[in-house]
Amino acid sequence: MMAEISAQPGGRTVISRKAARLDGLKKNWYRFSRNRMSVIGLAAVVLIILVAIFEQWIAPYPEHTGAYVDFAHSNVAPGKEFLLGTDQYGRDVLSRIVFSFRNALAMGIGVLAVAAPVGVVMGLIAGYYKGRPVSNVIMRIVDVFLSLPSLVLALAVSAMFTPTLFNSMMAITFSWWAWYTRLVFGTASSVRNEYYIQSAELIGASRFHILFRELLPNCSSTILTKMTLDMGIVILMGAALSFVGLGEQPPNPALGTMIADGYKFLPDIWWLTVFPALAIMLIVLAFNFLGDGIGDMLNSGEV
Amino acid sequence: MNDEILVVRNIKKYFPTKVKDRYVKAIDDISFSLRKGEIVGLVGESGSGKSTTAYCIMGMHGITAGTVTFEGQDISMPSSQRSLELKRKIQIVFQDPGTSLNPQRTIGDILKMPLLVHHIVPRAKAFDRARELLQMVGLPEETIYKYPRSLGGGERQLVAIARALTTNPALMVLDEPTSALDVSIQAKIINTLIDLQKQFNMSYLFITHDMSLMRNIADRIAIMYLGRILEMAPAADFFHKPQHPYTKMLLSSIPVVLQAEEELKPDKVESTGEIPSPVNVPPGCRFHSRCVYAMDRCHTEEPEMRVLFLDHIAACHLCGSAQ
Amino acid sequence: MEQQDRLLDIRNLYINYQVYGGLSYVIDGIDFYAQPGEKVGLVGESGCGKTTTVKSILRVLPKQAVIPGGEIIFDGDDVLKMKNNALNAMRGQKLSMIFQDPTASLNPVFTVGRQIRDTIRYSGMVGGNNKKQINDLAIRALMDCSMPDPERILDCYPFQLSGGMRQRICIAMALATASKLMIADEPTTNLDVTIQDQVLKLIRSLTEQRRTSLILITHSLGVAREMTDRIYVMYAGNIVEMAPTATIFERPLHPYTRGLLASIPKLTGEGIMAGIAGRLPNYINPPTGCRFQSRCKHCRERCKTDKPPAYHLGGGHQVSCFLYEGQKTLSAAERIKEGSPDER
């Protein structure tokens, strides 16, 4: 009789791929929800995304976000009619903030959608071939890009071209990929020597398989965590760029631009600066909490 | 010999150190062969070079000198230069089940990969074949969806064995496959390995430091010390008529549980000293610094391998006559 | 009945760990003792709780460990109730421990001499920080462990020494403080067989010379056979069998002990062993009744509901299995008369 080595004692026997995936998701949620701040972060991020999608219906005065002028109601303090007040052109601050979410998120997604894949691939190659020329070349290029302050670089690149949201995204992406390369290089170069990677090589797996199916999954937790935290940082950078006029152009609303327009009126007409600043802070915090939560969830493993 | 599937001839593997002209002589001229369907055991303590030998055969290291031949073909090159066909025929099971399976991949994915790389079955059938392999090693079906972290050490090792089996190899190299496992689990793994070996007529190169285990599995045993083979014999002879002083020292140091085993152990050869560093291999017989029988000759002249009985060779000035 | 001649007496000890998911019931009511000068083996496989047990004696369990019940009496003192000062004195002077991995036990950035001298100094053995005396004791300790050239070794760093030598240094450190009890937790598992032989011999001769008691933890019955007078077999937080060493091998009673012995490959070449099917039970949700039930060929209904008590058969042999319920068991008085001093 075949002696049985049974499955996890006390666990359910899982007999289909769907059930296994579901089980995995449940476990992950369990770990994630242990930390209240992470759940708050997740809720806040979801809220931000919903606001960005449904901006038309959420903003009380959607028409104020275009070329709109109403000097009769300019610089009105926050009150019943305009919840967060109006600016010098009579435009509702709340509506403009709501409408700025879309381009803030777009900045984050746009930068990461390019920087992350490029950076990760370079990092995998550099890590796998550590010690060989290709790896050294990549990492020296990374060193160069990371030694330049990204904001200054972004400013320089932006200033070279006409200032638009798209161009400012490109400017940040230009150096942002290097962070991912360095991060992934660290993990990949150590994992690369593990027996399971050597096993795959000995079996004859292709380089593609080893890089993307064996190595990459071991880096994914750090990458995902970083991407989430990066959303906050990139959005902040985007606000900095638009503060100096290098992002989304008026009359389209952008958080940085709103602060730039409003700060000279401090401290009397405080609502023009304070609310957009608060909005930036809340967005960044939300992604930070979410990022921390994702990091804990993916790294806690089995207790 | 036509039924010799693996022939290792005078191989050396030296690792360079920071000091010029000083090497770690992990393997320092060994020769042995493995016949088809045979289990050869490679025994030795730390620093003996047994794992390095396994890795050289697999191509994880290149060889500094000598040749390794598999099925008549020269395979002395590292694995990156080997053909896919060759990679299919020789497989390895590593010692630590914790690190030999990718923790981010399911067992199913781990088993399917070799099947697809070598086109053993069409993609649509790969999943079923993986299930069959799990059955062959005695694991339940649902293991296929699990991750290595949900499995115990014994189960993981069985998965590693199943993975090695995927390509129907002719030769399996087993590097201390049960050393990291409890003895009650070890038996299941060993039994599975023996059954599979008989079923598929594979040849095994089995590496371990556990002599009692070796006694019960191997057909022939070679004992290594500091990069050299000191004695090689069929299993029964190895234990009943050990010739080399090192073999005797090792055998007399093993803790055993039965009185019958005690009686089988050779007269106590006191274990003294420590194994020298492979960077500083002593002149003459490399074992002389620990050998109670060492003569003057042993300090200066390295003994050659001598044939003592049928299939039984040893490298010691005190044994037999030169080959 | 007071057992005053016992150096260490653990009674009815329970230890739980607070883990995510609840409580892990790791140690499930064990009784364990050692007499002065005695060598006791604690044999079990990984995860059975042997290290947890001895760590509780030293009170070095992690903070998620909770001891809901039981007592540990060492040299007349109740260890579980001791305060820090008394604990440190106990650890420094009366108890010593050596671990499995000598590399991890030695601080790589200090010389060996510094570490041995520190151990001696903190043990409080030498009053007034007398440097010469401490140094002499350190050299003496190394010489007792047959270390060649002790003066030179004292100036070495751990990485300059081999595994066997490092373990010998750990033994030297442990015995430098003239302790009453030495606990060795798998001291030779990471060492080669020939070195293992030397180290074990050293431990045996030193403990015998100084009449130090020894608790040897190992997963290897062969090692226990060579080193101990009495063996406890542990499984999943329970002591399943205890007997004088020779008896365990001549007449193993508990199905786990027998399974373990049967799993060991023998030099006599009988072929491959059977092993014990199954896995350790889940400590968070342990089964009611005997914890070995899922792997036992003789498991009956009763085993799933009641936990078998320790049956004291003659000759100092104790086994926790319902298979031996009907056999003639000795009462406490009979046992003492017989000369095998265990209780209950």
Image (cartoon, coloured by chain):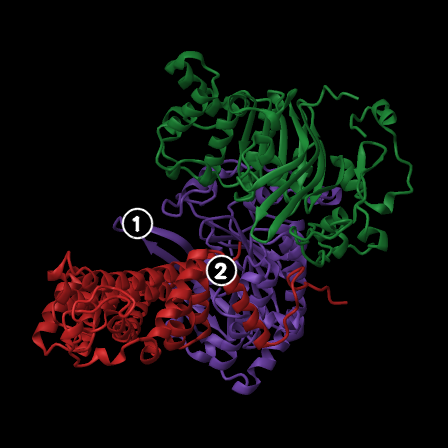
Q: Please state, as top left, top right, bottom left or bottom right, where the N terminus of chain A lies in the image.
A: bottom right
* Rendered position, B156 above or below C48: below
User: Which chain comes out red in the rendered image?
Assistant: A
Could you tell whether B250 is left or right of A226 in the image?
right
Q: Is mark 1 on a helix, strand or loop?
A: loop
Give the image quarter of residue A69.
Answer: bottom left
Query: Residue C109, position in %: x, y?
Result: 35, 36
User: Which chain comes out purple in the rendered image?
Assistant: B
Query: Residue C49, position in %: x, y?
Result: 63, 43
Query: Residue B233, position in %: x, y?
Result: 60, 57
Tell me which amino acid carries mark 2: Ser
Q: What element carries label 2?
A: helix
Q: Mark 2 points at which residue?
A: A33
Q: Mark 1 points at which residue?
A: B22
> Would residue B312 be seen by someone viewing this image from the given angle?
no
User: Which chain comes out green in the rendered image?
Assistant: C
**Which residue occupies 64% across, 56% down?**
B186
Q: Nearer the viewer, mark 1 or mark 2?
A: 2
Could you tell whether C231 is left or right of A258 in the image?
right
Tell me which amino acid carries mark 1: Arg
The residues tagged by marks 1 and 2 sit, at their Cα atoms, a distance apart of 57 Å
> Would residue C291 be seen by someone viewing this image from the given angle?
yes
Q: Residues within 10 Å of mark 1 (few under 14, many from 20)?
A: few
Could you tell whether A215 is left or right of C206 in the image?
left
